[in-house]
Amino acid sequence: MTARAEIVVDLAAIRHNVRVLKQLVGTQYMAVVKADAYGHGLVESARAAREGGADWLGVATIDEALALRAAGDTGRVLCWLTVPGDDWAAAIEQDVDVTVYSEDELDAVLATGPRARVQIKVDTGLHRGGAPRAAWHDLIASAADHDREGRIDVTGIWSHFSSSDEPDDPANDAQEAAFQDALDVAAGAGLEPEVTHLANSAAAILRPSSRRDLVRVGIATYGLDPAPGRTPDLGLRPAMTARATLAMVKRVEAGGAVSYGRTWTADHETTLGLVPAGYGDGLPRVGGNRAEVQVAGRRRPVRGRICMDQLVVDLGGDDPGAGADVTVFGPGDGGEPTAQDWAEACGTISYEIVTRIGGRFVRRHTDSERIAR
Ligand SMILES: *Cc1c(COP(=O)(O)O)cnc(C)c1O
């Protein structure tokens, strides 16, 4: 417990969350492990998700998919974001299912030679990646031809919601209807893909009609709430704790201003604690004067601006001593702030809090269901 600043990820929580969610949805489960598993560690998190029952792993880039293979994962893996010149052949050779958005991308896949497993992403209203409606017919017809002739295996058709965290937004119904249109185009072309899928965490939990054959679950795999205030209590367990060791305690007189720019001034004498983590380690600078951390078991407010390497908290006259344990955020069951609390204090979402934390935090994996490894 003496590390300066560390991220502790409980792999048992990931395993538990996958089990609970898979049971809830009753479909195949893709654990989304892009962006270093939302900051939780790609390889370890992927392994825990597989142990919990994940049928698929989902990543953005080919490099992420190859990293899973290099670590020994032999199950189904889907990737979905490429640029011209990416090494499609490497992904296909490693049995990764790749996603195409356009006929150019389909041509790049065909050029790799061996029979690739390909999924088609259709844009149903997010207007981000995926084939726009005007291109569905030709892309799907072309993919169907190549599938029939044995050059590729079209394993899936899928799309992605814009507003699944707002379940009452009519955009969700519109996207589900548009997705059905795309599937009708595929059926018309004679395609029978192994899986069709649309739901991310929020949709998987809140919109049973969107579950289809498989759900792509990122944030909820890590125990965080995809739609705060709207999600029923499923007993998910946040896997990540960010902790540090208090560097110093000092007194400040009434009138003493704290940190750069003097944005907070003590109105009475108090004690201050120095936490050795800052925006250089991924804690948002905007959390100054807003966020809280837990020091020696008590919630303490951040005072003044968060600096690159450190932040200051108000200890209210107490002196837990240098070396005291600081929980920046954690599951919340010990009274500590959560990633969601940090997100609210910083005007962002928990995804960004856990994905960006890093810098000099050292990441360590534990397993509360087994002996710590
Ligand atoms: C990131 C991502 C997901 C996972 O979203 P969550 O809200 O974290 O569940 C699913 N599908 C796609 C295409 C994504 O990019």
Image: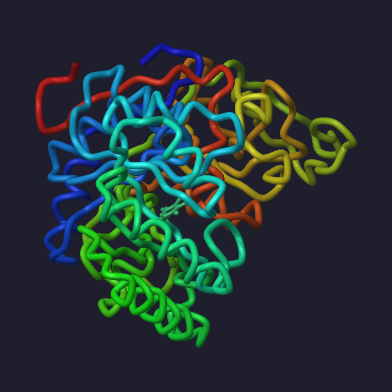
User: Which residue: 34% across, 51% down?
Assistant: 146
Residue 73 appears left or right of 324:
left
The one of 72 and 182 positioned closer to us in this rendering? 182
Percent x, y of residue 83: 60, 37
Residue 321 appears left or right of 309:
left
Ligand 1 falls in quadrant: bottom left
User: Which residue: 47% across, 64% down?
Assistant: 122
Q: Work out whether 58 lies above or below 47.
A: below
Splitting the image into 4 quarters, where does residue 196 fall? bottom left
User: Which residue: 48% across, 85% down?
Assistant: 174
Percent x, y of residue 76: 22, 40
Splitting the image into 4 quarters, where does residue 39 fall? top left
**Observer able to see residue 159:** yes
The one of 53 and 240 positioned closer to us in this rendering? 53
Quadrant of the rendering where the C terminus is positioned: top left
Residue 243 appears left or right of 204:
right
| Number of numbered labels in the structure image | 0
Percent x, y of residue 215: 28, 60
The one of 28 and 238 positioned closer to us in this rendering? 28
User: Which residue: 37% across, 39% down?
Assistant: 33
**Observer able to see residue 242:** no
Residue 322 appears left or right of 269:
left
Percent x, y of residue 336: 42, 44
Q: Work out whether 226 lies above or below 106.
A: below
